Image (cartoon, rainbow, N blue to C red):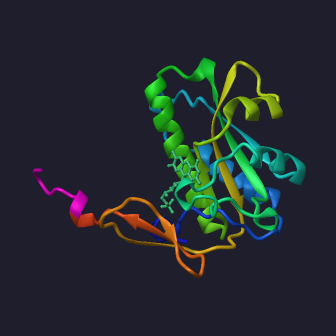
Amino acid sequence: MLVFKAIMKRRSIRRYKQMPVALSVLKKLVDAARLAPSAGNFQPIEYILLNKKSVVNQIFEHLRWAVYLKGKGTPSKDQRPVAIIVILINKKRAKFPFYTQVDMGAAIENILLAATEKGLGSCWFGSIDRPKIARDLSVPKSHSVEYVVALGYPDEKSVVFPMKKTHKYHKDEKNVIHVPKRTLKSILHLNKY
Ligand SMILES: Cc1cc2nc3c(=O)[nH]c(=O)nc-3n(C[C@H](O)[C@H](O)[C@H](O)COP(=O)(O)O)c2cc1C
């Protein structure tokens, strides 16, 4: 799949078919993240890959799903993620806090795009219970839990539409998610503002 096509196709998907994802595919996603640009090339990011159902379900409890869907965002038991990637920072390698965040943005987007190419649905989580995730996964004090990416073969649809009044996404009667995006015209300034 061409990169541009993957960018256009990728949407946050929060319901998944209960089909396993091959470990080799999941490892490829982390490999894609590993090769992302890194400020000063310090490469402070590390990853915990979860594909064991009991562990995935344990971490599932620490994620906050689709806040604008008010209860309709959290997947039922038979649509939960089948794999999770937990994004960690190795504090010794994190020389510039601001750039560490930027590095994670680049690395996580690589994961999401590679997942799209592999036919997977994904969702990036920032609203997570970091202390509980660190405790459950025995993350050492030298590392911090930063983000989570939930993964699985998609079991819902999401589409974009030109944003008008609200930035809040919603679901229609067929459970399709509609995500407002600012138009190219409204954000692009050519040669001067
Ligand atoms: C830094 C970051 C944190 C996010 N945290 C959450 C989250 O905690 N829970 C959730 O359901 N979605 C989360 N999302 C997904 C956004 O809601 C989603 O990207 C946005 O609604 C746009 O939809 P799209 O990804 O389909 O383009 C997060 C996205 C980003 C970039």
Q: Residue furthest front?
A: 70
Q: Nearer the viewer, residue 58 or 11?
A: 58
Q: Position of residue 27 (x, y in %)?
A: 74, 51
Q: Residue at x 30, y 64 (%)?
A: 165
134 left or right of 36 in image: right
The residue lying toward the viewer, choosing from 76 and 119, is: 76
Image x and y of residue 64, in percent: 64, 48
Which quarter of the rendered picture does the N terminus lie within? bottom right
- The residue at the far left in this view is 192
Q: Is residue 149 above or below residue 95?
A: below
Magenta span of residues = 186-193
| Secondary structure, magenta segment, majority class | loop
Q: Is residue 174 above or below residue 71?
A: below
Residue 2 visible in rendering = no
Identify which residue is drawn at 49% across, 34% down: 101
**Magenta run includes residue 187:** yes
Q: Is residue 160 magenta?
A: no
104 and 39: which one is in front?
Answer: 104
